[in-house]
Amino acid sequence: MPEEAAQQVRIDGQQLALLWQLAARARAAHSEAALGFTIVNETLSLVPYRQSAWWRGSAPGTVAAVSGLPQSDPNAPYVQWLNALCKALARGAPSAPADAAARVEGHVAPVLPARAQVRTFTAADLEADAPHVASDWSAWWPAHGAWLPLTDRAGHALGGVVFAREAAWSATDCALLTELGQVWAHAFEAFAPRASWLERARAVLRPGRQQRRVLIGLAVACVIPLRLTVLAPAEVTPKDPFVVRAPLDGVIDRLYVKPNQPVQRGTPLLGLDATALQSRYALARKDFDAEQEEFRQTAQLAVTDDRTRLDMAERKGKLDQSQVQLDYTAQQLARVKVNAERAGVAVFSDPNEWTGKAVAVGEKILLLADPARVELTAWLPVADNIDVKPGATLTLYPKSSPLSSYEARIDSIAYRAEPTPDGVLAYRVRASFVAADANAPLGAMGTARIRGPWVPAIYYVLRRPLTLARQWLGW
């Protein structure tokens, strides 16, 4: 700052009110462009000047706002001259003298930081550093200029604001602009782009004590033991259920029970269409009656005719054959109605899906399950397979009850993966609930957290990436 910086600075109430108003307008700006427009145009109400421009300091540096213009044209000659002027001022702008102190209304105020000090200059001050700028000064500007650099808290340049007028700059003008410069720098810093994670990492890992602390902390975190766990879809299934199968080939006529209906031993479950069997039974009955009558007549004739006695053996064989056919048809006809062989709950989906459906002998139709005897069946995806052994514990988190959980212990793990109903290749895991959680609802579905061995934290984090890398690179 020039020598008048040490002079007494007097600021009246109106100037303080304008200073407060301009500071509030700067903080309320909704964008960087709006803030620049406010700086170069509305500051005139506090400090008189003829020309003003805001120079954005980010590389390569451009004039972003000019007083009196809604938008600056970077190709305009005046804007290009201003750009060269601001670059020269940014390269060689000195800080204010250390002994510059201002008196405001008779009170001594401390000198503001050097980053917010105003530098006054004329064309003669630029002849050494920027002669081409000084030579064109008279064509664009009045005699006296002022340069206000803007910097953030870390001292990084944010740009600057340049002013020009005919009269020399007073100490009061410099003090007011210096105070506004701190407000503007704070406002521009809010619009500055945030540092990327890579830049922050570089700052943290810069050689020094902080770098050593971070590396030691990472090394300790890498060896912290963690329990290796995976998530798998699971369902509460019946344990040792009774499978009700089709007793013979036929078409299901009707189901006598509903899904999840409790049944007792001997309760009718389903019936097959008996129309074809009844016809076969009637035909077998007629064949048997006919063979029986022929055998009776042959037996009567055999009393007096020796040749007829020889046909009795053949008639007896045909009679026995028809008897067997009749008994077999009667047995099949008796099996068209299936009854429950033990008490339980009928487990199947929709009765309408089975009514009228053709089934083969031995085809599974429904289950009879005991609600008091359940187990947990989980599907461990091949991609998430870990070293899980029988006896390990897992926890079921049912979807229907988000606040409940059930503990179980693994009984067996399939050695071969098979497709799940969702088409995912997975290993079937069977587990028994512990005594306290043996009342898990039958059919409940959810997610099972399967616990594996203890591993270092670095292995827990890099297990999947290493697996993919090995598969892709063929290690």
Image: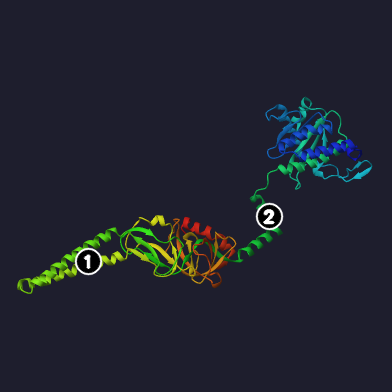
Specify the color scheme: rainbow
461, 212: nearer the viewer:
461
Residue 200 is situated, as x and y percent measured from the top left of the image, at 67, 51
Residue located 68% across and 46% down the image: 194
- Quick check: 69 left or right of 469? right
Task: Please say if 434 is above or below 353.
Answer: below
Q: Quadrant of the N terminus?
A: top right
Q: Would you name the residue on which mark 2 appears?
A: 204
358, 287: nearer the viewer:
287
Q: Would you name the residue on which mark 1 appears?
A: 325
- Quick check: 7 left or right of 406? right
Residue located 74% across and 35% down the image: 36
274, 356: nearer the viewer:
274
- Quick check: 301 left or right of 321? left
Element type where label 2 sits in the image: helix
Quadrant assignment, res 286? bottom left
Quadrant assignment, res 435? bottom right
